[in-house]
Amino acid sequence: MAGPHEALPTVLGILAAINSAARTAAPGPRRELLVLDARGAELAAWLHRDAGAPAPAVAYWHHQAKEWATLTGDGAMHGYVLLRQAQAADRTDATRMLDLARAATDGPWTLPPRPRAEAFQQQARALALTGADTDQVARVLDQAHNALAQSTLASGPATCTGPLGDGYTSERLMVQSAICYREAGQSRRAVRACGSSGSASANRWWPNRGRRSPSR
């Protein structure tokens, strides 16, 4: 599997081709192309971040993704990018992280259950980083579990036009919940939260570096 440095040129090339086609397309096809643009820009932001690019480069592509989502009336995608911005926020700026994650769930759109669960989990992590009461962190994690319980089975391999956040699973939420408790200084509760996820799962997702749950 190609790493971010290898994948970025291909993704940026595809985005350039889509943009070129969109400029002269009729309204219907143009909207479909801009929907792809928004998905591709969000991926470009993540690849830049994973490659260690400066924060302004990541922010540029997040901005582009939100702009194209807005132009197409795709509110859920706009909210999804806010979630990704919350995950990209530095742990030393937990207040911004919390504001972005709350905006993802509270905006004038309906996030699908999986990314909605992920946004609640990110809120819980931000709360833990700001020193919130552990019970408050637990209540928000309960919201995450409740949201995920409303999801349907994953539709299959992730694609650029598939459901948003289709790769966010109960296993990942379990481990990320443990990370939230660890951030809150509750190591024993973190171990209990990992539960049956097992050491292999924990090694996969721990520590939290904003790992991606694929939307494509």
Image (cartoon, rainbow, N blue to C red):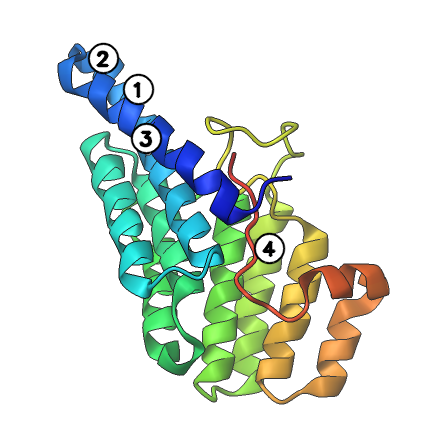
Instruction: Give the quadrant of residue 153.
Output: top right
Circle 2 crowding by C-alpha within 10 Å: few under 14, some 14–19, many from 20:
few
Nearest to the observer: residue 6 or residue 146? 6
- Looking at the rendered structure, the secondary structure element under dot 4 is helix
- Looking at the rendered structure, the secondary structure element under dot 1 is helix
Q: On screen, 215 above or below 23?
A: below
Residue 20 rendering spot, x and y as whole percentages:
21, 21
Sooner in the amino-acid sequence: mark 3 or mark 1: 3
Give the CA distance from mark 3 to mark 1: 13 Å
- What residue is pinned by disc 3? 15
Query: Which disc is residue 32 wearing?
Result: 1
> Would you say residue 115 is visible in this rendering?
yes
User: Residue at the location (78% across, 59% down)?
Assistant: 201
User: Residue at the location (24% across, 21% down)?
Assistant: 31
Circle 3 crowding by C-alpha within 10 Å: few under 14, some 14–19, many from 20:
many
Amino acid identity at mark 3: Leu
- Looking at the rendered structure, the secondary structure element under dot 3 is helix
Query: Which disc is residue 28 wearing?
Result: 2
Residue 133 rendering spot, x and y as whole percentages:
52, 88
Circle 1 crowding by C-alpha within 10 Å: few under 14, some 14–19, many from 20:
few
